[in-house]
Amino acid sequence: MALPEISRSMLKNSLVLGLFAIVTVGLVAITQLGTAERIADSERAAKNRALSELLPAGSYDNHPQDDVHLVHDPLLGSKGNSPVYLASLDGKATAVILQVTAPDGYSGSIQLLVGVLADGTLSGVRAIHHRETPGLGDKIDLAKSPWVLTFAGKSLQNLAAESWAVKKDGGAFDQFAGATITPRAVVKAVHQALQYFDAHRAELLKPVEKPHD
């Protein structure tokens, strides 16, 4: 029995709409994939740039990106493993760079690289991923503010435990106008990273074992 004209029209429209939906979903998926790859490439580039910025010139002759191992400790803020990059000069360890998570940022977790010289002094800190509020919490980003540079040169030895806080909490670090949660989270994460380094110094400064061919 032939379909009534109206039924054939509805079927045709349904097929067209279904095909349109399939094509749209496919285009969205392709766009998201391409965007995700660009974001990942951008984050890798930012991490490599930060790694080089955190190491004093002439203090290493290896490729820290390649001399990396994974560790796990609550002090580093991540539920999973965290990478540790080793810098060395003439085969002797000169610094490590810890990838640290501040889980209590205003808009979620903040990913940091924390450079620590072999003597336990901070060589620097960089934020490599965050979603903090533009114009407020994003001042942890060196491109937006020099605030993060205040960590360089500090250590557990030259700054008392109670000073590892923002000034609003009685500490040594400035907070941001209208945004205290973000710098508070970063200061706490950096302090904990130094505590982790202090507890595991000998282990962290050991040469990275690489698989044999």
Image: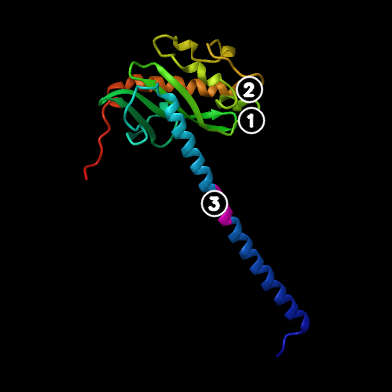
Residue beneath the point at 45% across and 21% down = 124
Specify the color scheme: rainbow
Q: Amino acid at mark 3?
A: Gly
Instruction: Report, in whole angstroms, how far the alpha carbon at label 1 lies from the one at label 3.
Output: 26 Å
Residue beneath the point at 76% across and 84% down = 4
Residue beneath the point at 38% across and 34% down = 83
- Measured as percent of width and height from the top left, residue 96 is found at 36, 25
Residue positioned most to the left: 212
Residue interval drawn in magenta = 29-35
In the image, residue 125 above or below residue 10: above
Q: Amino acid at mark 2?
A: Ala
Residue tagged 3: 34
Q: If you read the primary sequence from the N terminus, does the residue marked by circle 2 or circle 3 appear first?
A: 3
Q: Is residue 205 magenta?
A: no
Q: If you read the primary sequence from the N terminus, does the residue marked by circle 2 or circle 1 appear first?
A: 1
Residue beneath the point at 43% across and 24% down = 54
Q: Amino acid at mark 1?
A: Thr
Q: Quadrant of the C terminus?
A: top left
User: Judging from the image, what secondary structure is the residue with disc 1 in?
Assistant: loop
Q: Is residue 210 left or right of residue 18?
A: left
